[in-house]
Amino acid sequence: MKSALLKVVVGCSLLLSAQVAAASGLYLVREDDSEIDIYLKSQSPKDATDLLVLIQGSDCNSVAKNKLINEEFSQVLPEADVLTVEKYGITADLSWDRNDERADCPAAYIENDSPERRTADYIKVINQLKEGGIYERVILLGGSEGAVVANMIAAKVDFVTASIALNGGGRHFIDDILHNMKSSGMPEEAFKEASAGFKGFAQQVTSSEPFELNMSGHGYNWWNSMLKSDQLQIIAQVDTPVLIVQGGQDQSVSPKAVEEQIAKLDELGKTNVTYKSYADMTHSFKSAAGESMVPQVISDIQGWLAKLD
């Protein structure tokens, strides 16, 4: 039998804080009555004053099994409570698999997942937690698609203290897709053919009524949302501090497009936006030598947050 939706994850040697224990009765559903799977982890025996909201990327996996999020980036604020929220249709029962074309990705996820859906879910959960008046600060941190969602949340609400967007790409998603194609090393003629085909696909998705689609593990709602999204406009609406982190060796999103977006934000006078680039870092936070750069990124984020106090 499925347990209550708020799953409190605590290390075996860590005492459960009073506020996390009190929150364990939280039960939230979407407007269609589907359940929202929520994880709230206490990292300290003391009641935390910070809520660190971690937002995963675009893969079809349970966030509960993401070690990069739960074991590494959770240490950005080691005494904060850590909140993660599953995507529509995904639970911790789903096995871990990095294959974008995995055959067992839930149909409900393919049909319903989108950045807007995830943004609405996170806002609903955080609003509920904030009602208790427990947390003094809410810090958002998202990577890849999670960075897009973090920006969207920060643009829509007034409870965010600061947000961090990691390797989230530039203004238009299609530029990131074309960059990814170009980076694959395919011959120029093959790239021209593939890019023309994708542009045709993008035109169809953004100009048509919803249709059945499963491409690269995503459905119509996801593709329509990502292809229509304008990150420049979204970030321009955020007034709280934003840290944008981008790796220069990222093959999944375009570092050039990110640089162009930062220049536009500067032109708009967005002094709340800080940009930190790592010339040798890949999309998966690895150096050219294959070593993890996560510790350095976390240290730099901590330094940035400390300056906000």
Image (cartoon, rainbow, N blue to C red):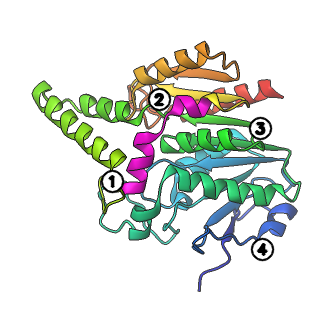
Q: Of label 1 and label 4, which has the lower sequence position?
A: 4
In the image, what residue occupies the spot 67% across and 40% down? 154
Q: Is residue 42 left or right of residue 170?
A: right
Classed neighbour count for the residue bearing mark 1: other residues with Cα under 10 Å, few (<14), some (14–19), many (≥20): some
The residue that disc 4 covers is: 25
Residue extent of the magenta highlight = 219-235
Front residue (pair 308, 173): 173
SS at circle 1: loop
Q: Is residue 18 left or right of residue 147?
A: right
Answer whether labels 1 and 4 touch (C-beta < 8 Å).
Answer: no
From mark 1 to mark 2, how far is it between C-alphas?
23 Å
The residue that disc 2 covers is: 171
Amino acid at the residue labelled 1? Asp
From mark 1 to mark 4, how far is it between C-alphas?
35 Å
Magenta part, dominant SS:
helix
From mark 3 to mark 1, how far is it between C-alphas?
33 Å
- Mark nearest the camera among 3 and 2 is 2
SS at circle 4: loop
Amino acid at the residue labelled 4? Gly
Q: Of label 1 and label 2, which has the lower sequence position?
A: 1
Classed neighbour count for the residue bearing mark 2: other residues with Cα under 10 Å, few (<14), some (14–19), many (≥20): many
Residue 239 x %, y %: 72, 30
Residue 165 x %, y %: 58, 35
The residue that disc 3 covers is: 161
The answer to if 225 sits in the magenta stretch is: yes
SS at circle 2: loop
Classed neighbour count for the residue bearing mark 3: other residues with Cα under 10 Å, few (<14), some (14–19), many (≥20): some
Q: Is residue 211 left or right of residue 237?
A: left
Amino acid at the residue labelled 3? Thr
Answer whether labels 3 and 2 touch (C-beta < 8 Å).
Answer: no
Q: Of label 3 and label 2, which has the lower sequence position?
A: 3
Q: Of label 2 and label 4, which has the lower sequence position?
A: 4
